[in-house]
Image: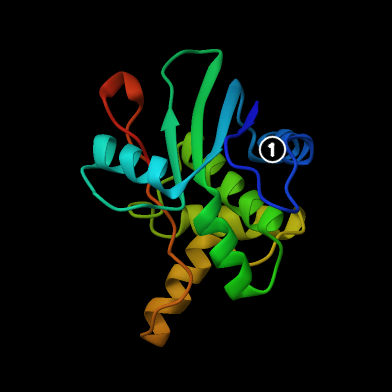
Amino acid sequence: MIILEHETEGTSARALSLFAAKAQRAVGLRGEVNIRVASSRELQALNRRFRKKNQPTDVLSFPSETPKLAGDIAISVEIAAANAAELGHSTEAEVEVLILHGLLHLAGYDHETDAGEMQTRETTLRRQLGLPVGLIERAHASSREGHGGPKPSAKSAPSRNRGGARR
């Protein structure tokens, strides 16, 4: 289910829902996934509450321990729109990149600890799904080039049942 708390030109809940279902199948993730496209202010509040980081972020994922619920994903439409403009693609494409990233976290991947496994999987799926450059690739390119750029990927947080969230 997609909840567009803040609609942006060029994004539709229906198109994002269709993409999310396709991406979820590609990831091999079972269970219901709820995706909230919200403001940076809301993402900052979630990031502060679950990760103890008082700053907005692009995507947070909240894995579930409930069998029929894979988890929840929260996305900042404002950060997505800014990154899309900087990278030269649509906001909808950027939200789709963030959905894929969040789904991979819900499936148990963690780019901060898995020695490149999530990046490899994200790159493969991104290409299969026709998406622009992924979050982990951007973060690695930015660190190699030694300059800023689009906001790097968020980390996954522990499941809400354990009191956390993933970026």
Q: Taking the image as drawn, is residue 59 in sight?
A: yes
- In this picture, residue 3 sits left or right of residue 152: right
Q: Position of residue 165 (x, y in %)?
A: 35, 35
In the displayed structure, would residue 49 be above or below residue 153? above
Dot 1 corresponds to which residue? 20
Task: Give the residue displayed 67% in from the left and 52% down from the top.
Answer: 125
Task: Give the residue displayed 48% in from the left and 62% down from the top.
Answer: 136
Q: Which residue occupies the extreme left position in the image?
A: 52
Q: Taking the image as drawn, is residue 167 in sight?
A: no
In the displayed structure, would residue 83 be above or below residue 155? below
- Choose between 2 and 130: the one closer to the eye: 2
Q: Position of residue 4 (x, y in %)?
A: 62, 36
Q: Which residue occupies the extreme top position in the image?
A: 67
- Choose between 38 and 120: the one closer to the eye: 38
Looking at the rendered structure, the secondary structure element under dot 1 is: helix
- Choose between 47 and 126: the one closer to the eye: 47
What's the colour scheme? rainbow
Q: Residues within 10 Å of mark 1 (few under 14, many from 20)?
A: many
Q: Position of residue 1 (x, y in %)?
A: 65, 26
User: For the residue marked with disc 1, what is the amino acid?
Assistant: Ala
Dividing the picture into quarters, in which one does residue 16 lie?
top right
Task: Give the residue displayed 73% in from the left and 48% down from the top.
Answer: 11
Task: Give the residue displayed 70% in from the left and 68% down from the top.
Answer: 89
- In this picture, residue 121 sits left or right of residue 127: left
Dividing the picture into quarters, in which one does residue 132 lie?
bottom right
